[in-house]
Image: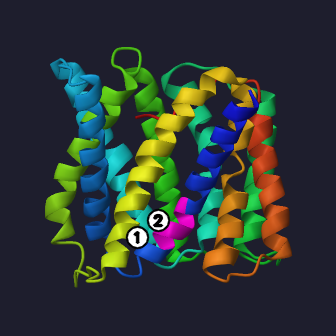
Amino acid sequence: MIKAYAWLILCVVVWGSNFVFGKMLVQVFSPTMLTLLRLLFIVLFLIGIASYKKGFKRVNKAEFLLLFVLGIIGVFINQWSFFVGLQTADPTTSALILATTPILAGVLAAIFLKEKLTVRMLIGSIIAIIGIYFVVTKGNLTPIHVDKGLLWIVITMITFAIMIIMTRVLSQRIDPLTITLYSNIVGFIVSIPFAFSLDIPIRISLHLNDWAFLIVTAVVVHGLAALIWNQNIRYVDASKASILSNLEPFVAMVMGFVLLYKPITGAEILGSLFIVGGVVLSTYQRKRLYKRAV
């Protein structure tokens, strides 16, 4: 049990660090090209896993249509908006906004999957929104002036919530590896023309260290960490594991301080407590909406 929690905490550290890693990478790669390259290496990793597990499975037309939409919205747009946003958005604030994804996923589940909305979820949502307001305004009770990058991060959050719902529907028919592999292939193919039309000018680092950083973070964040999470999640209580995943914003905060020398403010800490507290209140003891897919 202790070993399983240790592995899960490691996964949370990796996912929380991804906000800082993305902020660093988008300084040397243009966002759409970065999306294309990350998806390329993720797909190569997944193909290797699928080959090892003999996981190439056929899907019918209806399933392929859902996977195609998932690949566009939940993979390409999700990752592209993430990197576009991180060009100007603060990684800690971005992590806090994305931490509210389970709340939006719960609302979407109520609308499309006919799940019940509870008073607990409503109260938790209000608390989380107060926390976001506090972080975005930096503790000043003034009208919100939202950085354009944060609007892109909101789009990332919305597409992530859609991905959770679609993955849940598809997982009733298809195994997680097939869902992740095929949707990422679609996302990669869709990203190719956009990488050469949206990024003007195209920026690609010529330094080997930047490429190694890109490849390692892509494989570890979107591949190995998800495999480790799914391997160990069965040994612990699901609600406790869900609370662990809510620690990602705090990891982003610490990693931003260590790698980007960004000071941690009182407003961020207080806002983080409101946001994470609201999310935990909304989702605690709810059936887990998603599994980290590989």
Give, as a single range, the part of the protein colored magenta. 18-23
Is residue 3 at least partly visible in the picture?
yes
Amino acid on which disc 2 is placed: Trp
Location of residue 169 with respect to 219 vertically, above or below: above
User: Residue placed at 47% from the left, 57% from the top?
Assistant: 155
Circle 2 is placed at which residue position?
152
Determine contact: label 2, label 1, CB under 8 Å.
yes
Location of residue 81 with respect to 211 vertically, above or below: above
Location of residue 276 with respect to 195 vertically, above or below: above
The answer for how far apart the CA atoms under marks 2 and 1 are is 7 Å
Is residue 145 at least partly visible in the picture?
no
Query: Relative to 57, is 168 on the left or the right?
Result: right
For the residue carrying disc 2, how many other residues have a C-alpha within 10 Å: few (<14), some (14-19), or many (20+)? many
Does label 2 or label 1 sit earlier along the sequence? 1
Tell which residue pokes out farthest to the top in this image. 173
Circle 1 is placed at which residue position?
84
